[in-house]
Image (tube, helix red, strand yellow):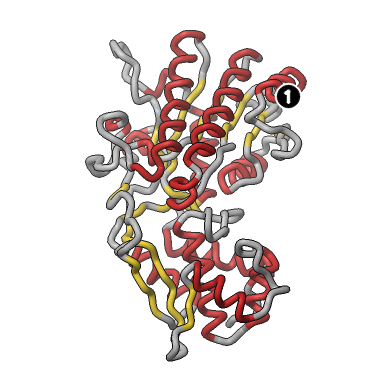
Amino acid sequence: MDKNAKIYVAGHRGLVGSAIVKNLKEKGYERIVARTHKELDLTRTDAVADFFAKERPEYVFLAAAKVGGIVANNVYRGSFIHDNLMIQNNVVHQSYRYGVKKLMFLGSTCIYPKNCPQPMKESYLLTDVLEYTNEPYAIAKIAGIKLCESYNLQYGTNFISVMPTNLYGPNDNFDLEKSHVLPALLRKVHLGKALENNDWDAIYRDLEALPIEGVGPGHGKTEILKKLKEFGVDVRDNGKVFVEIWGSGKPMREFLWSRDMADACVFLMERINFKDTYGAGAAEVRNTHINIGTGKDVSIAELATMIKEIVGFNGQFHFNTDKPDGTMKKLTDVSKLNSLGWKHTVELNTGVETMYQWYLSRGVGAGTG
């Protein structure tokens, strides 16, 4: 990519997109185009067509998506498949129409089968059934991969797909109903510590920044405690604080620092083309996507313990085995990515500590120490 090229980052305010924008700017790319959802609704075909006709970006990072954790994926199934299909169909098609030089489509490792062999190689795509709770989202992302592949093969475009593992970092979603496991757990443990210290100022600050189902600092302590209990932060009769975790704690998960992910994305956009993603002379072009991850995983129980130590929480965890575990193991095979010349640099404990300090720097937790 030329440093003066016009680059459109779709989803620039989110965890993924904001990290990509930061990485691009650090590397000297200056002509970055971005629009908020209010300014440009990517589910609207006419609006996206008008945007591309006016801006004519040369490169596109498609990081915009409707995302969420296990609860949100399972409850809002129609929204997740519809919105994601519309976003990617509109952006990919208009990128083709207006001659975008290269596009990167970002998906998720939930595209792989529920009982996928471990670690998950790109070639395992579509070899078995998906995990039920996030099936609509996964199907949309699989469609995105095939959309890029198919446009490349029919129209000669240069659209590549990457599948990041579970991401975390600055600008993550800490909504306890809709967020992924790591930010949700970090926030719950932070609130548990505040309760432990009877630090209501910290609780009020947290709820002012992000109310829980409308409950914020203007509500009474009884109502706040009731709402926190609904989301798994509970003070028991003995005064001990418990934080609930869905499932047994045994599922293994891989986590990648969002800024590492962004570095991998920019690295690939600068150096890799569609033709580099599959074997030369292949009779059938399949599985051209590239996994982005660390190749390392931890159990949810181990993650919880790590967060507990970093936050300084002295309470206890309650593993609610009445709730689903989801897939028991999801570890990416990153040999394809490593062979292309990129490897992660931030280990999980360092990333979680940095993320917590970022969370506190937003003013939600000062005073809980």
The secondary element bearing badge 1 is classed as helix
From this view, report whether residue 241 is shown above or below residue 97. below
Side of 156 relative to 278 (left or right): right
| Residue 256 visible, this orientation | no
Q: Give the percent coordinates (x, y) of residue 187.
A: 53, 67
Side of 176 relative to 347 (left or right): right
In the picture, the quarter occupied by the C terminus is bottom right
Q: Residue, x 49% and y 34% (percent of image)?
A: 81
Side of 34 relative to 264 (left or right): right
Q: Residue, x 64% and y 34% (percent of image)?
A: 9
From this view, report whether residue 278 is shown above or below residue 132. above
Three-letter residue code for mark 1: Phe
Q: Residues within 10 Å of mark 1 (few under 14, many from 20)?
A: some
Q: Give the percent coordinates (x, y) of residue 308.
A: 44, 74
From this view, report whether residue 130 is shown above or below residue 238. above
Q: Which residue is mark 1?
A: 51
- Identify the residue at the far bottom of this view: 238
Q: Residue, x 60% and y 80% (percent of image)?
A: 222
- Identify the residue at the far left of this view: 117
| Residue 219 visible, this orientation | yes
In the picture, the quarter occupied by the N terminus is top right
